[in-house]
Image (tube, grey):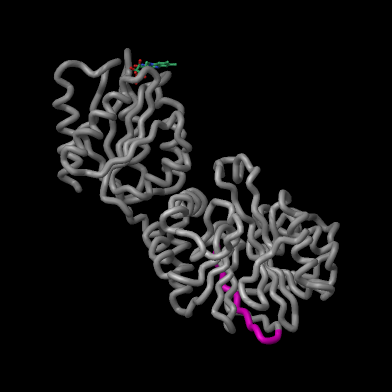
Amino acid sequence: MYCTRKVADDLIWVGADDRRLAMFEGVYSVPRGVSYNSYLLLDEKTVVFDTVDHAVEKTFLENVEHGLNGRTLDYLVVQHMEPDHSATIRTLLMLYPEAEVVCSKKTEGMLRQFFGDAVKMNIKVVGEGDTLKTGKHEFTFLAAPMVHWPEVIVTYDLTTKTLFSADAFGTFGALNGALFADEVDFFRDYLDEARRYYTNIVGKYGVQVQALLKKAATVEIKTICPLHGFVWRENIGAYLEKYQKWSLYEPEVNGVMIAYASVYGNTENAANILACRLRDKGIKTTMFDVSVAETSEVVAASFQYSHLVFAAPTYNGGIFIKMDEVLRDIEAHSLKNRTVAFMENGTWAVTCGKQMKEIFAGLKGMNIIEDTVTIKSALADGQEAQIEKLAEAIAETM
Ligand SMILES: Cc1cc2nc3c(=O)[nH]c(=O)nc-3n(C[C@H](O)[C@H](O)[C@H](O)COP(=O)(O)O)c2cc1C
């Protein structure tokens, strides 16, 4: 049975929630589920904007069929070829073979890569600024390369001032019946998931997101229809401000994120003492044990906080594996402009502080605090003073 909601009188959300997916993109847990959004326009011509993941194909096809109500599908706009949005293209085109596929030149190549030549596609390639008139509505297309694949376009409805934003402005989390961000307390209940989504998925491409935001700033936007999460029609500015900060790598919290690893508890003990000394100075702290925390959460928090401390044991001559994974992921996301400090532990040859530092030395704008605390198995008498010194060094840079 179809399950749809109206974005406007002639625009229907024909997507679906998936609450069974264990790992989004094989990496990110989605305990609150995820939505795959697709939109159907019923103008003189009919248009579907992107499709959905295989997991929700049945509902999507029923939704489109119900929305069309016997009409034919004239256009399928493909903004992004990642399979969570494109997997259902083949089936949709088999059902509506007359539909013209509107996409970028790069998408045309990717369609062939993913689907081969088996499905006949009537493709209309569009470039930056090209327009498509469907009756009452007129659309223009903007290139958004690397937000977050190279082929991405976003679509702006000149008539209603609606931005179909592809993966930009998305969030993890099923919609649970709500479609609009103003139907939930987004900034209280979903901002953390939106940050985790942004930082992990497009966080590396701040420059490209900035380019898209600059283009978006030249037009009035009344509604944003992303491919995951809620549709925005109120308080859009507040969400744009978050994107502005995230894409400029500006921290949201002047405070310290402490991420630690600890096999036997001694590094954890040092990390806890540091957190207490920082709080004594009135500094905000948050902590993660990287053995149990999701790496994507630590990456998101490293974008959120101004100061980062990493504490880990030496492990087979290197960095403890779970910490290594976190640090490599932060490095892969090209985080910039943070103050960073380290605590290292080891029983016979303590090397991981230097190795952790080397990772950050390769990132732009990192202020590395040199007073690494070195622990030999467990904190020795008198080492409280070293931790206090590190807390003071951090406080001086706040
Ligand atoms: C598999 C394994 C490999 C280790 N490799 C090293 C090493 O290369 N160098 C070293 O100094 N200590 C090494 N250690 C010891 C730990 O780093 C050390 O005991 C540290 O104090 C543990 O801190 P924790 O109490 O926070 O777990 C290793 C421990 C384990 C379990």
Q: Residue furthest bottom?
A: 136
Q: Looking at the image, which is closer to me, 297 or 70? A: 70
Visible residue check, residue 146: no
Q: Quadrant of residue 369?
A: top left
Q: Per the image, is 138 magenta?
A: yes
Q: Quadrant of residue 43?
A: bottom right
The residue that appears at 82% across and 74% down in the rendered structure is 72
Q: In the displayed structure, does residue 230 sit left or right of residue 121?
A: left
Q: Position of residue 166 (x, y in %)?
A: 58, 63
The residue that appears at 16% across and 41% down in the rendered structure is 281
Visible residue check, residue 210: yes
The relative height of residue 307 versus residue 111 in the rendered view (above or below) is above
Q: Position of residue 339 (x, y in %)?
A: 27, 45
Q: Looking at the image, which is closer to me, 298 or 57? A: 57
- Give the residues in magenta: 135-145
Q: In the displayed structure, does residue 81 sit left or right of residue 239?
A: right
The relative height of residue 90 versus residue 40 in the rendered view (above or below) is above
Q: Residue furthest top?
A: 348
Q: Position of residue 230 (x, y in %)?
A: 55, 62
Quarter in which the N terminus is drawn: bottom right
Q: Per the image, is 252 magenta?
A: no
The residue that appears at 53% across and 73% down in the rendered structure is 223
Q: Position of residue 382 (x, y in %)?
A: 14, 19
Q: In the displayed structure, does residue 346 sit left or right of residue 49?
A: left
Q: Quadrant of residue 140?
A: bottom right
Q: In the displayed structure, does residue 232 sit left or right of residue 310?
A: right
The relative height of residue 103 versus residue 326 in the rendered view (above or below) is below
